[in-house]
C-alpha cells in the first residue's frame, strides 16, 4: 500500500500480495479507516477475459461476473457498490480448459502493442475518477473504451 496525491485528492494504491481469489484481504486496512466509503473511495482495476483486448469499461457497481477477485472484494465489503475498471484481455481461445492458464500467460508482442496504445486513455479515466468521481468518468470514457484495430 502506498499513499499520495493526484489532482489535489488523496490517493491510496493497494496491490494485493495474495492470490487473486483473496483480493479482498488487501482491503482490510482501508476498512478500518472510519472515513472510508467503498462506493466513493474505491476503484478496482481488474482484467476481464469476457471483453476484447484493448477495451475497457468503468462501472459504479455490479456483480463479480464470475471473477473470483471481484467476488473476494464483494465479500470483504459486503457490498457490490464500488467502482471498477474492467480491462479487456479476451477473447479466450477456444478449447482452453483452464482460464488461469490464459490470464496468467504473458502477452504476445502484438497484444502488448495494443495494450500500450490504450493504456494512456485508461490512465486518464482513472485520473478522472480520482478528481471527478465515477459517474463523470463513465460519461467521459466508456464510449472511448471500445477498441477496434
Image (cartoon, rainbow, N blue to C red):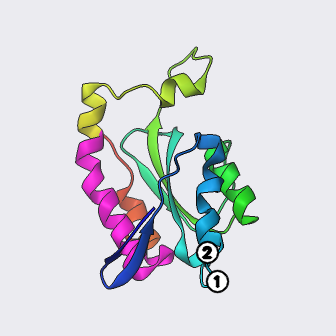
Residue 122 marker: none
Mark 1 vs 2: CB contact within 8 A: no
Q: Residue at left 30%, top 42%? A: 115
Q: Residue at left 47%, top 34%? A: 90
Q: Is residue 149 visible?
A: no
Give the labeled residue for mark 2: 39
Magenta segment's dominant SS is: helix
How far is disc 1 from disc 2 in space, using C-alphas?
A: 14 Å
Please provide percent x and percent y for residue 23: 61, 50
User: What residue range appears in magenta?
Assistant: 115-136
* Quadrant position of residue 19: top right
Work out whether 101 lies above or below 81: above
* Quadrant position of residue 10: bottom left
Label 1's element?
loop
Give the labeled residue for mark 1: 34
N-terminal of the two: label 1 or label 2?
1
Please provide percent x and percent y for residue 75: 74, 57
Work out whether 135 lies above or below 1: below
Label 2's element?
helix
Please provide percent x and percent y for residue 59: 55, 63
Query: Viewer-nearest of labels 1 and 2?
Result: 1
Residue nearest the observer in this picture, 89 or 146: 89
Magenta span includes 111: no
Horizontal arrangement in the rendering, residue 53 relative to residue 7 (left or right): right
Horizontal arrangement in the rendering, residue 87 relative to residue 19 (left or right): left
Amino acid at each position: 500500500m502506498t499513499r499520495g496525491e493526484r489532482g489535489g485528492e488523496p490517493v491510496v494504491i493497494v496491490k494485493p500480495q495474495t492470490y487473486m481469489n483473496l483480493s479482498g484481504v488487501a482491503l482490510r486496512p482501508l476498512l478500518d479507516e472510519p472515513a472510508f466509503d467503498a462506493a466513493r473511495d474505491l476503484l478496482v482495476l481488474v482484467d476481464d477475459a469476457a471483453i476484447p483486448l484493448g477495451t475497457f469499461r468503468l462501472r459504479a457497481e455490479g456483480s463479480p461476473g464470475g471473477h473470483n477477485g471481484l467476488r473476494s472484494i464483494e465479500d470483504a465489503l459486503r457490498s457490490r457498490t464500488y467502482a471498477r475498471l474492467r480491462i479487456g484481455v479476451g477473447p479466450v481461445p477456444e478449447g482452453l480448459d483452464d482460464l488461469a492458464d490464459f490470464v496468467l500467460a504473458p502477452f504476445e508482442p502484438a497484444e502488448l502493442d495494443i495494450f500500450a496504445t490504450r493504456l494512456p486513455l485508461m490512465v486518464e479515466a482513472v485520473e478522472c475518477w480520482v478528481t471527478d468521481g465515477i459517474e463523470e468518468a463513465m460519461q467521459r470514457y466508456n464510449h472511448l473504451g471500445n477498441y477496434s484495430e
